[in-house]
C-alpha cells in the first residue's frame, strides 16, 4: 500500500485562552509545563533569536522566507502570536516575490513590542 502525502496550507490555531498582550502567558506556561525557570530561558532565547533574525531580514537575503518560517515557529511555541502572524505574512511575501517592505516593517514592530514585554517579564523575576 502506498502512502499518499499532500501538502496542505498551515492554518494557525487560535490560542485556547485569548490574551491581549504580545505573549499569551497561558500558552507559554503550557508549553513550559509551568516551569518558571524554563519560561525565562525560552523568552530570553526568543528575544535574542528574533533580534538576530530581524537584523538578517533587513538585508533581504535570498533565504528570507526560511528565516521568516523559523521565526514563525519559534513565536508560536512561546505564544507570541502577533509575531508569528507577521512572520507568516512575510514568508508569503518572500515566496511570492512581492515587495517585502511593508511586511518586514510589520514584523519589526511586532518583534519590538514582544521584546519589550519580554524585557519587563525577565526583570520582574
Image: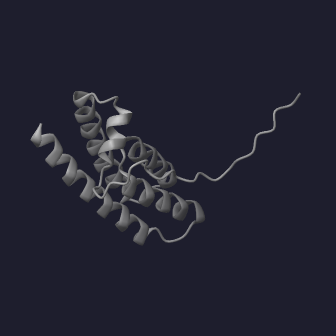
Coloured how?
A: one colour
Q: How many marks?
A: 0
The answer to whether 30 appears left or right of 36 in the picture is: right
x and y percentages locating residue 67 in the rendered image: 45, 49
User: 100 or 62, which is in the foreground?
Assistant: 100
- In the foreground, 35 or 97: 35
Res 103 → quadrant: bottom left
Q: Quadrant of the N terminus?
A: top right
Q: Is residue 3 left or right of residue 83?
A: right
Question: Which residue lies at the image location 42% right of the left edge and 46% below the top edge?
Answer: 76
**Residue in the foreground of this view, choosing between 2 and 60:** 2
Q: Which picture quadrant has residue 5?
A: top right
Q: Is residue 53 left or right of residue 64?
A: left
Residue at 10% over, 41% down: 124
Residue name at image x 37 percent, y 35 percent: 30
Q: Residue furthest left?
A: 124
Q: Position of residue 50 (x, y in %)?
A: 32, 48
Above-or-below relation of 46 to 22: above
Quadrant of the rendered image containing residue 29: top left
**Which of the image's four quarters has the C terminus?**
top left
Is 118 placed left or right of 29 in the picture?
left
- Residue at the farthest right position: 1
Amino acid at each position: 500500500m502506498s502512502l499518499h502525502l499532500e501538502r496542505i496550507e498551515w492554518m494557525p490555531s487560535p490560542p485556547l485562552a485569548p490574551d491581549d498582550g504580545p505573549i499569551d502567558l497561558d500558552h507559554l506556561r503550557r508549553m513550559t509545563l509551568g516551569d518558571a525557570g524554563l519560561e525565562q530561558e525560552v523568552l530570553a532565547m526568543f528575544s535574542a533569536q528574533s533580534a538576530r533574525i530581524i537584523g538578517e531580514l533587513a538585508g533581504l537575503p535570498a533565504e528570507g522566507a526560511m528565516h521568516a518560517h523559523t521565526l514563525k515557529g519559534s513565536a508560536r511555541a512561546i505564544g507570541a502570536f502577533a509575531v508569528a502572524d507577521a512572520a507568516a505574512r512575510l514568508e508569503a511575501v518572500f515566496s511570492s516575490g512581492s515587495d517585502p517592505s511593508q511586511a518586514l516593517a510589520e514584523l519589526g514592530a511586532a518583534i519590538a513590542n514582544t521584546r519589550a514585554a519580554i524585557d519587563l517579564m525577565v526583570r520582574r523575576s
